[in-house]
Image (spheres, rainbow, N blue to C red):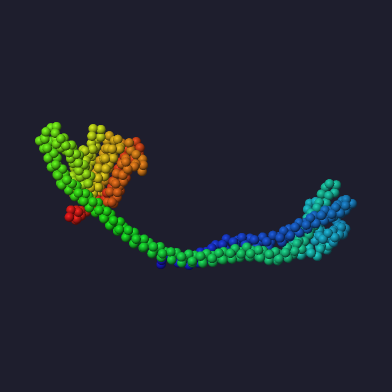
């Protein structure tokens, strides 16, 4: 059986559980309210009536005790034996004060045998009696007690009569207290159930929409990933083609213009040697020779910038070594840690590595005022890592303009990102600069076709 419950079933179970919970918690309160409302007023009335009757009995007992005390004063010994006279005194209190019964006891508490039942009230046996006593005092000595009883039947009857209407009132209030909240809970639960049903339908629709949207996003992401991969591959091939084209141009400059200027230079040297030392021809040839030397230097510099032919001649590690040797001078020491994989790198990777190190060394030599540089090239499982550290003056990232190496940094980043790599620069004023480049090892696999296209 599935652990999942339908939304409608969950709503119904929540509704029933809440009604039962509220009913179980309210039932003791409702019963207590019913008992309090039904019994409190009748019991209070009965208690007040009983208290009044007891006060009345106590007053009657005091009056009877005073009357008998006068009889005792006249007949200190024989008063207790004159039953008729005692009964005559007591009858008046039974008739006038509403006493149910009156009894007399001596100082020892022994009841004096009198026919008190003959003068008892007709209500004496119609319910419980409340007895009150008063001492019979003679010469400041208690010689007996007068006991007066009153019937509580009327108070009980009145309380029972009150119990009916107050019971109905209690039932009404208890019903209101019980059914009004339950009715409100029932209506609220009905609305909650409807809301839950609507929410369940909305959730079902939303889940379908989310699933469809997720599928669309997954497809779009996969397409974007494929396009990004193709774009990165095209970018890498563009870099490779560009480098190949630059090498072709550099080779043409070196082989054609360079050789032609070299031949001209040789002819000019011969003219200087053959002409008269102070002749116009010798001076013109010397000036032209100087111009040719400057032009050859510019061509060599252009060849170096267009296409590092040294990569084809000696490989990446040796090319970096020579590059470091060219920048190293008396006040700048460059340490190297160079490592390449056994199978070498693609032409695009080699070119980017060489260009990045060349630009980093140029910036450090021109702008950093550094005395120590460290160049690192190492192989990681998925990346080729380049690091160039200097102990120069550093700079604030983002504030370097084109004239102070900013454009070179932008070019470095563009070259790296074209091959799907990333470049990070850590620097601060006075703290030197650390450049770290990570390039994917499989940015582009050379197949020889691109170079062939350019050469052709």
Q: Report the quarter where the C terminus lies.
A: bottom left
**Looking at the image, which residue sits at the far left?**
274
Residue at the (76%, 59%) spot, across then down: 49
Q: Position of residue 239 (x, y in %)?
A: 25, 51
Answer left or right for 38 relative to 292. right
Visible residue check, residue 46 = yes
Residue at the (14%, 40%) spot, across then down: 265
Q: Is residue 229 above or below residue 430?
A: below
Q: Nearer the viewer, residue 445 or 241?
A: 241
Question: How many numbered discs, if any?
Answer: 0
Visible residue check, residue 20 = no
Residue at the (83%, 49%) spot, across then down: 137
| Picture quadrant of residue 388 | top left
Q: Is residue 121 above or below residue 317?
A: below
Q: Position of residue 15 (x, y in %)?
A: 52, 65
Q: Is residue 137 above or below residue 372?
A: below
Q: Is residue 369 above or below residue 407?
A: above
Answer left or right for 267 relative to 166. left
Q: Nearer the viewer, residue 319 or 201?
A: 319
Q: Report the quarter where the N terminus lies.
A: bottom left
């Amino acid at each position: 059986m599935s652990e999942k419950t339908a939304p409608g079933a969950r709503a119904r179970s929540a509704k029933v559980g809440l009604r039962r919970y509220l009913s179980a918690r309210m039932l003791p309160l409702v019963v207590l309210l019913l008992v309090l409302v039904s019994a409190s007023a009748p019991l209070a009335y009965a208690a007040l009536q009983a208290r009044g009757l007891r006060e009345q009995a106590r007053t009657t007992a005091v009056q009877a005790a005073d009357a008998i005390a006068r009889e005792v004063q006249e007949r200190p010994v024989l008063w207790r034996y004159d039953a008729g006279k005692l009964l005559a005194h007591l009858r008046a209190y039974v008739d006038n004060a509403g006493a149910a019964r009156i009894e007399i006891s001596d100082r020892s508490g022994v009841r004096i045998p009198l026919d008190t039942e003959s003068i008892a009230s007709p209500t004496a046996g119609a319910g419980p009696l409340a007895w009150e006593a008063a001492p019979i005092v003679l010469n400041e000595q208690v010689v007996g007690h007068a006991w007066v009883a009153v019937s509580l039947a009327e108070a009980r009857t009145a309380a029972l009569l009150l119990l009916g209407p107050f019971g109905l009132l209690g039932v009404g209030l208890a019903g209101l207290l019980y059914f009004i909240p339950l009715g409100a809970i029932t209506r609220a639960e009905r609305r909650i159930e409807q809301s839950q049903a609507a929410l369940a339908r909305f959730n079902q629709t939303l889940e379908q929409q989310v699933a469809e949207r997720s599928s669309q996003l997954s497809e779009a992401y996969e397409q974007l990933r494929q396009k990004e991969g193709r774009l990165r591959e095209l970018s890498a091939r563009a870099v490779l083609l560009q480098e190949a084209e630059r090498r072709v141009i550099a080779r043409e400059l070196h082989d054609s213009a360079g050789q032609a200027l070299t031949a001209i230079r040789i002819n000019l040297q011969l003219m200087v040697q053959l002409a008269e030392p102070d002749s116009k021809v010798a001076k013109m040839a010397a000036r032209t020779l100087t111009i040719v030397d400057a032009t050859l230097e510019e061509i060599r510099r252009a060849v170096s910038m267009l296409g590092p032919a040294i990569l084809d001649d000696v490989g990446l590690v040796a090319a970096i070594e020579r590059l470091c040797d060219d920048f190293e001078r008396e006040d700048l020491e460059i340490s190297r840690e160079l490592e390449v994989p056994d199978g070498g790198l693609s032409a695009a990777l080699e070119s980017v590595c060489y260009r990045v190190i060349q630009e980093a060394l140029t910036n450090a030599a021109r702008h950093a005022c550094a005395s120590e540089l460290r160049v690192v090239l190492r192989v990681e499982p998925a990346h080729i890592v380049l690091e160039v550290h200097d102990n120069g003056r550093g700079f604030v990232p983002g504030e370097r303009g084109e004239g102070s190496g900013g454009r070179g940094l932008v070019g470095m980043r563009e070259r790296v990102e074209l091959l799907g790599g990333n470049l990070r620069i850590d620097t601060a004023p006075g703290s030197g600069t650390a450049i770290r480049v990570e390039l994917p090892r499989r940015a582009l696999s050379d197949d020889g076709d691109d170079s062939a296209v350019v050469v052709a």
